[in-house]
Image (spheres, coloured by chain):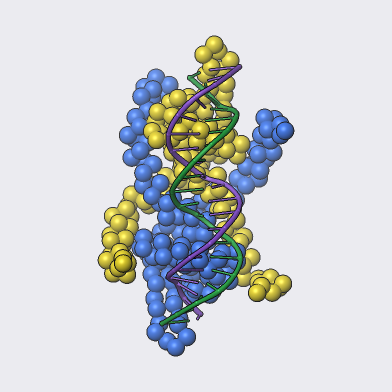
Chain colours: A yellow, B blue, C purple, D green
DNA sequence: CAGGATCCGGTAGGATACTG
DNA sequence: CAGTATCCTACCGGATCCTG
């Protein structure tokens, strides 16, 4: 059903959406933001993060940590001590992102009630369940 | 710095992460941002969005639209004309979000190269593939 | 034109056990 | 302490067909 011609209008959206989509790809993880927030106030150790985020599994913590490190958002420092010690710290890039994320948090807190209200209204008006 | 932060209260993290997590729950959809961006410059029709976003399926468009509408981010206007006509427009709340999102876009564009470089470095250094 | 219903695969993410 | 490995499930998202 799709013709071989490409529509020009999509390029604009793509050009705008692509970087954001990439960011979200790195950040949209259920835990990425939590980790960035948790690591924002200084170097954190693995177990600290695990306890701080509370609900995350070791697996997801490791995976998300790796992803963030790979994208240059986290700097991983291994201390070759007898009990292994690893610290994670935000890079400058990530600190900027954290500031931006703060705006999101702010927006979310400011409109949390409005969103809840909108949901309730929607469910009452249009969402007549069977 | 490194003295009194040992008890990184999980409550703080949760309190901060929760709203964000909610936002992301509404926004982190693969298409939500694209829709918000596409609808930012005025009322858009269903088919317009479908063509603009280019890659989205009718199903996901509908679902994402519903979700955004339910959260009070989109206002849906149905014109009971013979060929049905539906327009979607950002609410004030969503316009604010869009501004915030712009920061994210900005951040992404500014650090896109750095991220790519970090990835390459990571893959070269630690990511010796099998 | 706008969207609902259904099937179906890929993957994000959770639980658990093992290790250097 | 800081991971890794394996299994398993839920849901996201695509394709297709049907409707008002």
- Residue A7 falls in which quadrant of the image? bottom right
The furthest residue to the top = A82
Residue A99: image x %, image y %? 46, 43
Q: Nearer the viewer, residue A98 or D1?
A: D1
- Looking at the image, residue A7 sits to the left or right of residue A97; the answer is right
Q: Is residue B83 above or below residue A16?
A: below
Residue A40: image x %, image y %? 45, 34
* Residue appearing at x 41%, y 59% in the figure: B96
Q: Nearer the viewer, residue B58 or C10?
A: C10
Q: Nearer the viewer, residue B30 or B38?
A: B30
Asked if one can make out residue A2 in the rendered structure from this viewpoint, the answer is yes
Count the marks: 0
Residue A79: image x %, image y %? 56, 17
- Residue D4 falls in which quadrant of the image? top right
* Residue appearing at x 69%, y 35% in the figure: B123
Q: Quadrant of the C terminus of chain A?
A: bottom left
Residue B36: image x %, image y %? 48, 62
Q: Is residue B115 above or below residue B83?
A: above
* Residue appearing at x 60%, y 45% in the figure: B111
Q: Is residue C9 above or below residue C17?
A: below
Asked if one can make out residue A72 in the rendered structure from this viewpoint, the answer is no
- Looking at the image, residue A67 sits to the left or right of residue B85; the answer is right
* Residue appearing at x 39%, y 72% in the figure: B76
- Looking at the image, residue A32 sits to the left or right of residue A15; the answer is left
Q: Quadrant of the N terminus of chain A?
A: bottom right
């Amino acid at each position: 059903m799709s013709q071989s011609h490409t529509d020009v209008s999509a390029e604009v959206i793509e050009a705008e959406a692509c970087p954001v989509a990439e960011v979200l790809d790195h950040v949209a993880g259920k835990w990425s933001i939590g980790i960035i927030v948790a690591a924002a106030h200084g170097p954190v150790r693995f177990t600290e993060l695990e306890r701080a985020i509370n609900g995350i599994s070791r697996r997801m913590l490791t995976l998300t940590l790796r992803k963030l490190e790979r994208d240059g958002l986290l700097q991983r420092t291994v201390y070759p001590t007898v009990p292994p010690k690893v610290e994670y710290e935000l890079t400058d890039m990530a600190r900027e992102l954290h500031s931006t994320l703060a705006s999101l948090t702010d927006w979310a807190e400011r409109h949390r009630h409005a969103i809840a209200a909108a949901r309730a209204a929607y469910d009452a008006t249009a969402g007549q369940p069977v």
